[in-house]
Image (cartoon, rainbow, N blue to C red):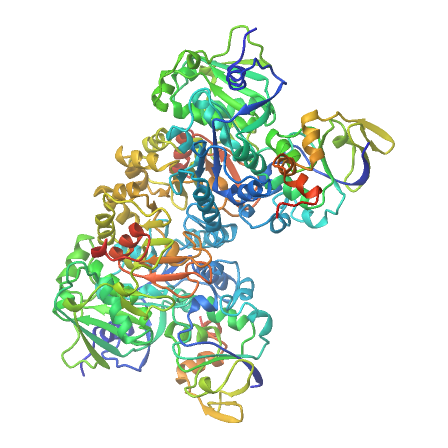
Amino acid sequence: MSVGKIFKFHNDLDTDQIIPSQYLLLPSIEEMKAHAFESLDPEFPQKVKPGDFVVGGENFGCGSSREQAPGVLKALGVQAVVAKSFARIFYRNAINIGLPVIVCKELPDQVETGDEMELSMADGTAKAKGNTYPCTKLPPYMQQILNQGGLIPSLNEEVI
Amino acid sequence: MGMTIAEKIIALAAGVEEVKAGDIHTVTLDRMMSNDGTTHLTVDMYHTKLKNPRIADPKKMVFIVDHNVPSDSPKTAAAQKKMRDFARENEIDFWEGKGVCHQIMMEHYVCPGELIFGADSHTCTYGALGAFGTGVGCTDLLYGMVTGTSWVLVPETIKFNLTGKLPRGVYPRDLMLTIIGQIGASGASYQVMEFCGDGAGTLSVDDRMVLCNLAVEAGAKTAIFEADQTALDWLAARGRKPKAVFKSDEDAVYVKEYTFDLGKIQPVVARPDFVDDVVLAKEVVGTRIDEAFLGSCNNGRIDDLRVGASILKGRKVSDHVRFLVVPASQEVYLAALEEGLIRVFMDSGAIVMNPNCSVCWGSCQGVIGENEVLISTGTRNFKGRAGHPSSKVYLGSAATVAASAVKGEICTEDLL
Amino acid sequence: MGQTVIEKILSRNTGSLVKPGDIVTVSVDRVMIDDIMMPFIVDKFHEMGFEKVWDPDKVVMIYDHLVPSSQQDDVRHYKVGDRFAKENGLEHVYRSDGICHQLMTEEGYVKPGDVVFGTDSHTTTYGCVGAFSTGIGYTEMAAILGTGTVWIKVPETIKIAIDGRLPDHVMSKDVILRIIGDLGADGATYKALEFCGTTVEQMSISSRMTMANMAIEAGAKCAVFTPDEKTAEYCGTVLGEWERSLSGDGDAVYDKVITYDARGFEPVMACPSQVDKIQPVRLLEGTAIDQVFIGSCTNGRLEDLQAAARVLKGKKVAPFVKLIVTPASRKVYEEACACGAVKTLVEAGAILTHPGCGLCCGRAGGILWDNEKVVATNNRNFLGRMGTSKVEIYLASPEVAAACAVAGKIVLP
Amino acid sequence: MEQFTGKVWVLGDDIDTDIIIPTEYLALKTIEDMKKYGFSPLRPELASMIREGDMIVAGKNFGCGSSREQAPEVIKALGVRCVIAKSFARIFFRNSINNGLLLIEQPDLRDHVEEGEEISVAVNSHITYKGRQYPIASLPENLVEILNAGGLVKAMRARNGLDRRKENGTDGH
C-alpha cells in the first residue's frame, strides 16, 4: 500500500460527525460525501486525497448504524481508518463495503493531522514518523470479506 | 459449558448445540427491519450491485418510514418513495407515519428467542422481550434480505445485576444513563449487556426497552433481559407466542459483572456532547434552554407521556421554550388521547407532533439553531445532532425534560 | 347613491364618502405579521428610521409557517420576532398555536367593519366576519407599523349572490372553487368580492372563512360577507346599527353581479397546476393518488376535520397512501380531540401533526417527489408548491379528500 | 422621459409567486441567497441567464399568489430592468412599486415578441419592437411619487427626516 496523509480525530468520534443526519436521505453517497466531517472540518472533503488515512482514538464511529459513514469515507478515497478501537456497527459496515479498518493502539497518540503514514495490511504494521507500529490483524473471516471487496461481491460469487 | 441467553439465541439461529464468545457463525435471521434512514441505499444496491436480485423471504422483512415524517423536502420524498415502491412490488410489510421503527417492531413483531437485524443502531431495544436484536448497515441488511442469513461474531456478555427498586421520581432512563456514565461510551463495546436480578424483575417491558435501547450508547452489540412472566404476559396480550424462552445457565461465562442498586439511583443528565458525560441533574440546574423534547424510541411511550403530563398539568411551557411532545407510535398516541394526556400537553402550549423520530435525529423537525440548547429524552447528544454545529443537547428523563420546559432552564421535578 | 359593503367600511374608516378608484389613506385597526416575513419587516422598519410601533395593541405576531422548525435557520425568525415584540411591548404573540388567519379570527382580533392588513395573501380571510382585510408585502407592513396608516385604492365590487340549499356532499370549498373557475385566476384582480344570498346566510363562519380565504385566488383585493348573528356570536360582540347595515345597498354600483342557484353546485377539484382549472370530481374519478392533505387556513377547521372523520369512521386509509391532517389551530385540535374526530382520524391511519401551515406552505409537512399525486384541501396547487414541479396537486373539499384517502384514488364521497 | 433598451425573456400567463421564488427558499438570510432559485420550478436555468438590464415580458396575472415581497426583490436582484405583462396581480404590483421595480402593463407585446430579442421602452409612453410602437399608460401619481423616492423605505426615511439630515451633512450619528 502507498503512503498517505493523516487526518486525525478525537476519541468517541461519532457517526453524526462523519456524516450529519440531515444529509442521510440525499439520493446517493456521491452527493453526501461533500458533507463529511462538516461540523469538525468543513474543508475535509476538499482536502482529503485518495490514499489518505483517517486516524481516530478509542471507540471510533460510535453512534448510529448509518452505513453512509464508512460509505462517504470510502467514496472520498480514504485508504483506511486507523484507530485505537472501533464501535462495532461502524467496524462491521466498513468491512462489508470494503473499507479497511485497522486497530492500532500506539500510532494514534504519536501522530497529528498532516503527518504521513504507510500501512502494510499483510505485515500488520503501520509506519509513521520513522516508527513502525503493530496493528491487530483481522479475523480470517473478515479478512476474506475485505479481500473480496466487501460483502456484495461475495454474494455475487455464490452459486445460485 | 453453560451459555448466556444471547449465546443460546445465536446457537439456535445457527443450528448448532453450543456457541462461545469469539466464534463466528452463520445464522438464519428471524426478521429484518429497515427504515428510511438507509433503505433507499439498500434498494439502489439491490438493483445495481446484484447479479441475481432476490429476496429470501419477504415475510421476514419490515420497512418502516419514521425518520422524516412528514417528509420535509423533495429529496426525502424521493428516498421514501423508492422504499414505498420497493415494498409494494415485493410484498414487504410497510409502515409509514405509524411510529418509531423500534416501537412498531415491539408492538407488532418481536418475540423472545428471535435473532433480528435492523438497519438502525437502536435495534438492541428488542432485548426487552428476550430477543437478540442488533443494528447493522445497509449492506448487511441487503445480504440478509437476499440470503436470509448473515454472519455473527458471538459477543462476550457482561452481567448487570440489578437490585432493589427505583425511588419515586427516578426513572429507568436515569438508571441507564447512570450505567452508561459509569462504564463509558465504549464500556460494553462488541458485548452483550445482560440485565438480571430482582431489580430487573421490578421493571415493566416498557422500562426494559429504555435500558436495552440505550445499550448501543455504551457500544454494546445488544442488551437483553430474560423473558420472564412479565414479558410473556405482555406478549400474550398482543396475541404473540415466543420462539424460545431462554435463561442464562448457572455456569455461563460472563466477561464482567456489575451490580447496581436501583434504590440509590438519582436523577441524572448527560451533558453535551457525549452520552457518557453523565452528572447528577442538580449539577446543571439553571442552564437556560431553548427547546425541550419528550419522545423517541427511548422515552416516547405512555409511561413517559404520563410523567410529562403530570408535570405539565395546570402549568404552561415557558415563553421562550419550544416543547415538542412526540409519542413513539400511534398506539401510544391513542392511549394518551384516551387518558386525556394530549389535552394536558396542548393546554400547556406544547407542540404535539405525529409519531416519528423528530428532533432525536435532528434532520427535519424541531431542528435547533445557532448556540441553542435542547434538553431531550432522545437517544444521543452528539455535537450538532439536533441542528446547528454550535448547538447543545442535554439528555434527561421525561420528568426532567418536562420540568425544564416549564421553568425555561434545566430543572428537576422536585425543584419545580 | 348606494354603497357596497366595502365602500361603507372604507367610508367610515376615512370619514369621507369614497367611490371606486379613489386613492384614500386608511387608519389601520389591526395588523398581522407572520414568522416567515419577520426579519425582513424588522429590517425595513429600522431602515425607515422608526423606533416604536404606532400602537402595540394593534399588532398581532404569529409563528406558523416555520413551526415546528425544519431547518437550522428557522429559529432566527422566532428570535428576531421575540426581540421585536419585547422592544415594542407587543403582547399578542403566538408561537405555536396555529395558522395566522385562523388565530386572527378565532382569538377575536378582527371585528365587523375593521380595516386589517397582514403580510400574507390569504389575509382576505377576515371578510368572513365583515371586515376589510388584505395582504401586503413586508415593506408596506414596516411602514404601517411606523405610521398606523396606508394608502389604498378603493376597489370596485363584484357581487356574488348564491341562493338555495347546497346538494349533499357539497361544501363551501366546492362553491368557491367553482366561482374561481368561472371568474378565472385574475377575474377579480384589484376588486372586492361581496358574497350574499340565502346559501351563504346558512353557512357557518368557518365555511364563509373558506370562501373569503380563497378570494385572492381570483386576484381579489378582499372578500366580504354581511355580518349577522352568527358573526356576532363568533366574534363575541354585539352588532350595532352600523354593523347591521353592512350589506350592499339596492342601488349600489357593482362592477358585476353574478348569481348562482345552489342546487347547481357539485363536488369539484382544481386540477394541476392552476387554481382556476376546475373539473367536477365525477370526471376525475379513478385517478390513483399517493397522498391526501387535510388542513390549512382554507380547510383545517373543526367542521372540516369532522367532515373528514365522518367519511373515515371505521375505515382505513388505503395501503401505501398517506393521509396528513394538520388542524388550523390549537383550539381546533383540542375541540377535535373532545368530539372524537381526532380519534377517528388517527385510528383510520392519519398522520396528525401539530397545528400550523404544514404542507400548504411547502417547506415541510409532507413534501412529495416527481410524478406523485396529492389531493389537498388548501388554497394553492401551483407548480412546485409541495415538492418538485412534477408533483400534481388537486385541490378539493375535506369530504372529497377523505373519500380519496380511503379509496387511494379520486372518488366522489 | 426615461428610455432604455434591452433583451427580453418571455413567460406565460399566471406566473405565480411560488414560481418566482418557492417557499422552500423564503427563509434564506438574504435576497442574494435566494435569487439563484428565481423561477426555478418553471425554468431552473433562467436565473443564471438573466443579465443586468434584461426585461421580462409575460402574459396576464403576473405575480399572482402569495404576498411574499421576496418575489419582486428577487427579480430586481437578478438585474431585471422592468417587467412588462398583460396584467399584474395586486399584491405583487404594490410590492414592486414599494421596492422601486418598474412594472408596465401592455396587452399586445407578449403575443408578438420572441425571447432573446431587443425592445426599447419609453416610460409612460410606449414600447418599440421591430419598428412597431406599443402604447403604455402612465402610472397614477401617488405611485410615481413612491417610485421617484426610490421605493417606500426611502420615502419613509425622508418622512422620518433621516435622509434629509444626511443631505445637509449633519447625519444623526
Q: Is residue B90 left or right of residue D7?
A: left
Residue depicted at 64% across the width and 30% down the height: D61
Q: Can you see residue C289? A: no
Residue drawn 41% across and 59% down?
Answer: B386
Q: Where, by quadrant of the figure, is residue C94 drawn?
A: top left
Q: Locate residue B332, reporting x and y percent.
A: 26, 49
Indicate left or right for C372 with C198 as reference: right
Indicate the quadrant containing the C terminus of chain A: top left, top right, bottom left or bottom right.
Answer: bottom left
Quarter of the image for residue C64 reads: top left
Give the residue at x 29% y 74%: B14
Q: Position of residue B410 (x, y in %)?
A: 30, 58
Q: Image height check: is D129 above or below A55? A: above
Q: Quadrant of residue B393?
A: bottom left
Q: How many marks?
A: 0
Image-based side of C311 in relation to D65, left or right: left
The answer to whether residue D96 shows anywhere in this view is yes
For this rendering, which residue is in front, C93 or C219?
C93
Q: Position of residue D117 (x, y in %)?
A: 81, 40
Front-most of residues B415 and B172: B415
Relative to residue B88, is residue C330 depicted above or below? Answer: above
Q: Residue furthest right?
A: D131
User: Relative to residue D70, is residue C292 drawn left or right?
Assistant: left
Depth check: C264 or B288 in front? B288
The relative height of residue C209 versus residue A76 in the rendered view (above or below) is above
Residue A125: x and y, percent?
48, 90
Q: Nearer the viewer, residue C249 or B156?
A: C249
Quadrant of the drawing holding the N terminus of chain A: bottom right
